[in-house]
Image (cartoon, helix red, strand yellow):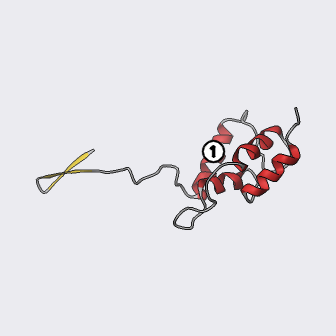
Amino acid sequence: MTVEKDKRVMTYDNRGVEPLKIKESTYNKQNRKMRKENPSMGKKLTSGTNPRRVSFACRFGSMKGGMKDKDGSPSRLAKALKKWGFGSKEAARNFCRKHKSKK
């Protein structure tokens, strides 16, 4: 998108804007609305040993990356783990080891 200002052409740079950086309250509000409109969606799995939760723990517990961003705020990995009921990657790994099915 270009904007003319004082007979100069300025280009709007949106590379620094990340759409996934929304506030927790905004996310929860959108999530409630989405779940209300789609009652067939699966429920939130923040506890228990549901196979989907075990699978999530196995995938995300072994991911690379820190729990904090460079600025000290929780990383997206940390937020995802929290949404699924895990306090850390170590907790997710331990849960995975304990509950994954042995083939």
Image spot of residue 35 (x, y percent):
68, 41
Question: Does residue 1 sit above or below 71 in this rendering?
Answer: above
Position of 50 with respect to 65 (left or right) is right
Residue at position x 72%, y 55% in the image: 89
Q: How many marks?
A: 1
Residue linked to disc 1: 33
Q: Amino acid at mark 1?
A: Lys
Position of 51 with respect to 2 (left or right) is right
Classify residue 90 by image quadrant: bottom right
Image spot of residue 26 (x, y percent):
57, 55
Image spot of residue 45 (x, y percent):
78, 46
Is residue 35 among the parts visible in the rendering?
A: yes
Furthest-bottom residue in this view: 72
Residue at position x 66%, y 47% in the image: 32
> SS for tag 1?
helix
Residue at position x 73%, y 58% in the image: 88
Position of 28 with respect to 49 (left or right) is left
Question: Does residue 72 sit above or below 45 in this rendering?
Answer: below
Q: Quadrant of the C terminus?
A: top right
**Frontmost residue, 91 versus 5:** 91
**Frontmost residue, 42 versus 29:** 42
- Give neighbour class at mark 1: few <14, some 14-19, many 20+ (Cα, 10 Å): few
Is residue 44 among the parts visible in the rendering?
A: no
